[in-house]
Amino acid sequence: MSSSLPPVPAAATPADRLVALTRLHHALEDCRRCPAMFGPSVHSATLISPVMLVGQAPGTREIEQGLPFCWTAGKTLFRWLGSIGMDEPVCRERLLISAVCRCFPGKNPKGGDRVPDGEEIVRCAEWWRGELALLRPRLIIPVGKLAIAQLMDFKRLNEVVGQQWRYRDPAGWEADMIPLPHSSGASTWFKMEPGKTLLAEALALIEAHPAWRALRADHSLVVK
Ligand code: SF4
């Protein structure tokens, strides 16, 4: 799907990018393209950060509160990130928290939340890809299989978690990518071996990454 938002030149200043991101978030708030999805759509604070996190899709609580990762999956995720130096309030102020889909997909009859279908993923890609293009982050943290699959080919979490990868954008810029497993209570992968060890290795890689270290030490790297 082509974007309805005007492209931002590569040389745009952080202030210009922030203006464009504000416009993108306003347009996202009005999006009602998916008949099977439940809104309103959710986005994080509007800010330009060197680190961008990409989750799967909000749940009911996130929709009610208009805040990504505000319930059980968020508690686990922010506990992980807090263990490497940025707790929930700091993460919310310094990271752009995006997602593959921005509305609640509804419940799966077999339990848990429905995984967005292919058409919904394509429709909603405008928003997270737009955020990615505006941020040009130095570090991308995809959380969970669905988010990782938008950025790289893989079959099993064991192959990709615990390692650092290179993202090459079609526009010519590059970023590091360190995947995490999904932090929802429905996942048991990170509670058992080898998931437990691979998660610890992934967190250690994020903690050592220059963009994470710089952001942790200096909040002025965020433009908002
Ligand atoms: S899931 Fe995404 S594309 Fe679909 S209605 Fe919500 S914001 Fe729009």
Image (tube, helix red, strand yellow):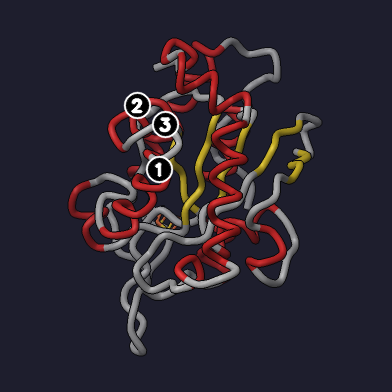
Residue neighbourhood size for the residue with mark 2, other residues' Cα within 10 Å, grouped as few (<14), some (14–19), many (≥20): some
Q: Is residue 142 above or below residue 16?
A: below
Tell me: residue 112, above or below residue 82: below
* Horizontal arrangement in the rendering, residue 206 relative to residue 113 (left or right): right
Dot 1 amino acid type: Leu
- Mark 3 surroundings: few (<14), some (14-19) or many (≥20) residues within 10 A: some
Residue 149 rendering spot, x and y as whole percentages? 65, 61
Instruction: Give the residue at mark 2.
Output: 93
Q: Earlier in the sequence, mark 3 or mark 1?
A: 1
Quadrant (top left/top right/bottom left/bottom right) for the C terminus: top left
Residue displayed at 75% across by 38% down: 169
Up/down of 106 relative to 2, above or below: below
Work out whether 113 lies above or below 199: below
Disc 2 from disc 3: Cα separation: 14 Å
Q: Nearer the viewer, residue 120 or 87?
A: 87
**Pointers 2 and 3 in contact (C-beta within 8 Å):** no
Q: Which residue is mark 1?
A: 28
Determine whether the beta carbon of the residue marked 1 sits less than 8 angstroms from the nearest atom of ligand 1.
yes
Three-letter amino acid code at disc 2? Glu
Residue 159 horizontal side relative to residue 116, left or right: right
**How many dots with numbers?**
3
Q: Quadrant of ligand 1?
A: bottom left
In the image, farthest residue toward the bottom = 110
**2 or 1: tag closer to the N-terminus:** 1
Label 3 belongs to which residue? 85
Does the closest atom of ligand 1 sit within 8 Å of the Cβ of label 3? Answer: no
